[in-house]
Amino acid sequence: MTGSTVPTRKYAVVFEKASHNWAAYVPDLPGCVTTGKTLDETRRLIAEAIEFHIEGMLLHGEEVPEPTTVADTIEVPAA
């Protein structure tokens, strides 16, 4: 028996530190957001949110967008 693999996609996620928590959103999936007490918790929650968001889109017959956003960090001299 051959194993089947589930296709995967990699979406860029933006994590932002707030005064008392962390927030995350996915630019390619408008409305896909979460918050958590720690960065690790927020990483876990946004992964769940992405899966749930895509599942909802499919259930409503919507096309799931391909990931197009690219995130990077740029180093600049400190002022």
Image (tube, rainbow, N blue to C red):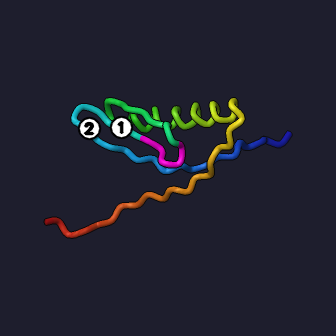
Q: Which residues are magenta?
A: 25-29
* Residue furthest to the bottom: 77
In the picture shown, does residue 55 fall above or below 6?
A: above
Dot 1 alpha-carbon crowd within 10 angstroms: few under 14, some 14 to 19, many 20 or more: many
Residue 74 appears at what percent x and percent y?
A: 33, 65
Q: Quadrant of residue 41?
A: top left
Q: Which of the labelled discs sits on residue 18, or is there none? A: 2
Asked whether residue 3 is drawn in magenta, I would say: no
Dot 2 alpha-carbon crowd within 10 angstroms: few under 14, some 14 to 19, many 20 or more: few
CA gap, disc 1 and disc 2: 7 Å
Q: Which of the labelled discs sits on residue 23, or is there none? A: 1
Mark 2: which amino acid? Ala
Residue 53 appears at what percent x and percent y?
A: 57, 34
In the picture shown, does residue 24 fall above or below 56?
A: below
Judging from the image, what secondary structure is the residue with disc 1 in? strand
| Prevailing secondary structure class for the magenta stretch in the rendered image | loop
Residue beneath the point at 50% across and 56% down: 69
